[in-house]
Image: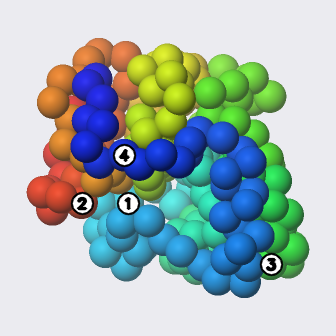
Amino acid sequence: MFRDVSSCNTYNYGDALYWDSRYIQEAGGAFDWYQRYSSLRPFVRRYVPTSSRVLMVGCGNALMSEDMAKDGYEDIMNIDISSVAIDMMRRKYEFVPQLKYMQMDVRDMSFFPDESFDSVMDKGTLDSLMCGTDAPISASRMLGEVSRLLKPGGTYMLVTISQIRKLDSSTVPFFFYSETSKWMTCL
């Protein structure tokens, strides 16, 4: 995977302190990176059964998981590097049993055993790591963890603003939606 630094800025998007500060400053609001669930729903419903155990990486304060729960998804584990975001979302959804929240770094999800999830959803998390410090190492660690956590035949759904120039899809089957190109493909 190549790093396109032209789309990056000086923020370290792989750093919990950056995200904690951002969520404190933007308290109360919700933000869905790139697309809302209503736009992605046809793809999600086609490739991720509602009975799936879903891992939402880098959930932030997005409405994606809430909308998926309203649409019948039964088990969504949401993780984020920001303890501020996780605390906020836990309080907001404490009475929605389909949604669980845990503070965790996607580069080390060793809390979960191998093959724990039917699907991993990623809306902008890999992009964030690619704009952070040690981008290739961070991305490699995250994708290794995603591969480890997916059950055989599971789906990794990546929603990104970048175009992937080179990708080895031999380790993780996934569906790719590019915000810049407005297309989705199965790799």
Does 53 appear above or below 24? above
- Give neighbour class at mark 1: few <14, some 14-19, many 20+ (Cα, 10 Å): some
Q: CA distance from mark 2 to mark 4?
A: 16 Å
Task: Name the front one of labels 3 and 2.
Answer: 2
| Residue assigned mark 1 | 44
Which residue is at a point 35% across and 52% down the rendered structure image? 159
Residue under label 2: 179
Please provide percent x and percent y for residue 35. 36, 70
Q: CA distance from mark 1 to mark 4?
A: 28 Å
In the displayed orientation, state which residue is furthest to the bottom. 28
Q: Secondary structure at mark 4?
A: loop
- Furthest-front residue in this view: 10
Q: Could you tell which of marks 1 and 4 lies nearer the N-terminus?
A: 4
One can see residue 100 in this view: no
Q: Circle 3 sits on which residue?
A: 92
Q: Which comes before the other along the chain, label 4 or label 3?
A: 4
Q: Residue 106: x and y, percent?
A: 63, 35
Q: Amino acid at mark 3?
A: Lys
Which mark's residue is nearer the viewer, 2 or 4? 4
Q: Tell me, yes or no, if residue 104 can be seen here.
A: yes
Circle 4: residue type: Cys
Of callouts 3 and 1, which one flags the residue occurring earlier in the amino acid sequence? Answer: 1
Q: Amino acid at mark 1?
A: Val
Asked if the residue at tag 3 contacts the one at tag 4, i.e. Cβ–Cβ closer than 8 Å, the answer is no
For the residues carrying marks 1 and 4, which lies nearer the camera in this image?
4
